[in-house]
Image (cartoon, rainbow, N blue to C red):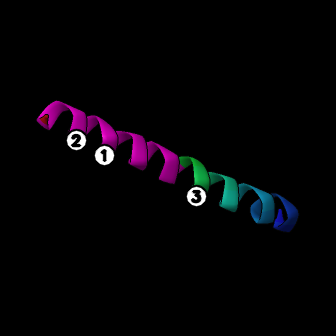
Amino acid sequence: DILVGRWFNPLLLLSSAAIGIEFLLLIQICKN
């Protein structure tokens, strides 16, 4: 569980950050 958490959490943060960035880019494109 500790190893899984150690690997899974950074990947989850990276994927959620990437989704957030893409969402912000979509909003910017729609505004223009």
Quarter of the rendering containing residue 23: top left
Name the mark on residue 24. 1
Quarter of the rendering containing residue 30: top left
Percent x, y of residue 28: 22, 41
Percent x, y of residue 8: 73, 55
Percent x, y of residue 26: 29, 35
Residues 12 and 17: in front is 17
Residue 1 is one of the magenta-drawn residues: no
Residues 4 and 22: in front is 22
Q: Residues within 10 Å of mark 2 (few under 14, many from 20)?
A: few
Q: The disc labelled 3 sits on which kind of residue? A: Leu
Q: CA distance from mark 3 to mark 1?
A: 16 Å
Q: CA distance from mark 1 to mark 2?
A: 6 Å
Instruction: State the quadrant of the C terminus.
Output: top left
Residue range (magenta): 16-31
Q: Residues within 10 Å of mark 1 (few under 14, many from 20)?
A: few
To which residue does mark 2 refer? 28
Position of residue 3 relative to residue 15, above or below, is below
Q: The disc labelled 1 sits on which kind of residue? A: Leu
**Residue extending furthest left?**
31
Q: Earlier in the sequence, mark 2 or mark 3?
A: 3
Q: The disc labelled 2 sits on which kind of residue? A: Gln
Residue at 82% x, 57% y: name it.
Answer: 4
For label 2, the SS is: helix
Name the mark on residue 13. 3
